[in-house]
Image: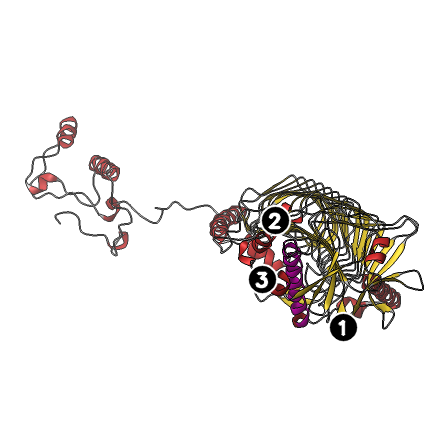
Amino acid sequence: MTTTTRASGGGARRATRVLAATIAIATAAALAVLIPASAQAATAPTPVTGTNAAGQQVITGRPYPGSPNKEAKLVDAEMQRMYSIRAISSAARWSGANTAVPFRLKIGNSFTLVLVARQAPYTVQDLLSLAPSSFVQMPDHSYLLSEDVFVAAGATLQLSNPDGMHIHLQSNPSGFTSIVTEQGNLQVVGSAKAPVVLDAWDPQTGKVDTDTSDGRSYVSVNGGLATFKYASFRNLGFWSGVTGGVTLSRTKMSAADMLVARGNSAGAGKTPLQNFGATLLPAGVPNTPANSSVDPSSTGGYSYVSALIQHSSFVGNAYGLFLTGADGVTISNSSIRDSLIDGLVLHRYVTNSTISSVTSTGNAIDGVDMTRASTGIVFNEVTANENGRNGITINGTPLASGPNATGTPVNTYGNNTVTDSTANDNARYGIEVMGGQNVRITGNEVRGDLSGIVVTNAATNVTIRNNTIDTMQKNGISMITNSTGITVADNVITKARIGVYGRNASATIARNKLSGISLHGVVLLGTAQGALVENNTIAGRGPSAVDIGRAQGAKQTFNTVDQWVSTKPLLVTIRSIFQPLTVMWLILLLVVLIAAIGGIRRRRRGAVRAHPYAALAPLSSYTKGVVDPETLGLPPAPYRLAERAAAQEPAPTESAVVPAAMSDAAANGSERDTEREAAQPSPVGLRFDDGPAGAIPAMGV
């Protein structure tokens, strides 16, 4: 205020220029913030939040558009239909029906074409012969399938054409069709110039079926082998993983199936057609001779599915591609997008599989979701961008936490790897590791998410190395909820509120390069026993570059923070400094300093320090004389006798008293008495009100 008042005209002009420059800088900063936000809003999905079990608001992904109650009932009806097909197919063997060739089942109002085991695969030409009224070619050379197809154990359905092919699975409010294998094989193979396309199709509207509330066509491979090359699966599936679009799942013959397949005598006297209320109808004669050498009932027990998927796409399905109970799956050079739930799902018991060069984008929840009980999975060069929740989720938590009705094991799962992958512009996390063990997250690029890489749920032995993390709304790397044995090393983290965040987690955080951080470079809270923060280069602006003061058991060393600008508030700084013990020592130091300063000031003024007893006097100064013993009738003092003998003085009379003014000899004796008396110790500080001005009477006077 004072400076402004005294400013001259030139100063006013300078102030005006400074004000204009300030406004320009503020405008540029605002544009710098607004332009990236606008650009990001054009690609990143809008976060959708919900409430978790703890009552916290979390990002859940986009809501499912269908009808949960109606679709759940449809899923249950499909499961009953599959059970009936398995049971009737097995029972038909001993009912007298011919099951060595394909046949048709009528269950309720729907028909299912059953392809039985044989060596040669069933082709499109076979379907045209077996189902001339339900598999027809359209004027545009596409095909319309209007009944369900069931591929039994030992059979293979081959839908392939090097010139490409488009197969519509009828799907409308009156019903939907499906292709399901049960320990059989499915091959969908096109070519680089022309893929084979399968989709859910409404013939009444002439468009793909996008309404899941009344069910929708799907493809499901249960056991056996799936081979998809240059194939495209579009707008398939609804509600559950089993009916979710394209599903690869293990299968298990039920106890009832096995009993019926073995000809259990409990069924004697009844025909299986009456038992299950279905009609067994012959199918058309296939072009290829049948071979019944494969017995569907001989493969009882679990049968894991395996798959080879290359150059294929999955677009607009409920679940893009759903795997469960699969082993040895290879997926490469394929894409998944715009799924109504998750993109690629590895649900449970998926083992020893490789996913490489796969893109999963624009899905409602996660791009890639590997749930519990899957091990030995390698994700390499996976792109998971712009999804409604996480880019990639790796879940290794136990299936159960204690005793349970089904005896489910409580062990954790792991040995999974995510390398050289991309997880950008997702609404929540780029990569999330939920529990498990021995997980490697290396060489990935994560940009524009809420948080970059997050480790939680007591994960152990997780390595996060050589990742590039950029422009996070919150944290670059987070470790929470009792995760231990974590290595965070050689990562580059740019533009985040917190570079590396840990809460109740133990990690070695080393050789990371952090820049553009706006709150804390590295912060650890809670229990962090054995945690070490070392050799990191941290640049940014905020309260602290490294904050481990609120963590138990953490250490830091050799971190480079010279490019960090501290913005810690004065009050916070004071509180951090003035701890109770610190305050006590400061008070003691202050007392010493005050005493020292006082002494220095006195010496500078030339003051002479007085003797502490200068104001006191010896007791001998408080008497007017000495009483001679001889006046009291006592023998003379020895020194008197000696003095008299030397001076030959006569002895004084008894009445003689030494006056105050004594002879020189007496005075000398008196002085010696005074010296002897002064040599004796006297009480310190003893004073008399009648001192030298009015001395006390002499002893005996």
Residue 482 drawn at (x, y percent): 55, 50
User: Can you tell which of label 2 and label 3 is closer to the viewer?
Assistant: 3
Task: Say whether residue 627 is left or right of residue 154.
Answer: left
- The relative height of residue 279 versus residue 374 in the rendered view (above or below) is below
Magenta residues, as a range? 70-94
Q: CA distance from mark 1 to mark 3?
A: 33 Å
Quarter of the picture containing the N terminus is bottom right
Name the residue nearer the viewer: 126 or 400.
126
Amino acid found under the numbered disc labelled 3 = Lys
Disc 2 to disc 3: CB gap under 8 Å:
no
Residue, x 48% and y 48% (percent of image)? 592
Q: Nearer the viewer, residue 611 or 33?
A: 33
Residue 388 place in picture, x, y as percent: 74, 62
Q: What type is the residue that disc 2 sits on? A: Ala
In this figure, which residue is indicated by the disc labeled 1? 174
Residue labelled with disc 3: 270
Determine the secondary structure under disc 2.
loop
* In this rendering, the label closer to the viewer, 1 or 3: 3
Element under label 1? loop
User: Is residue 611 a member of the stretch shown in magenta?
Assistant: no
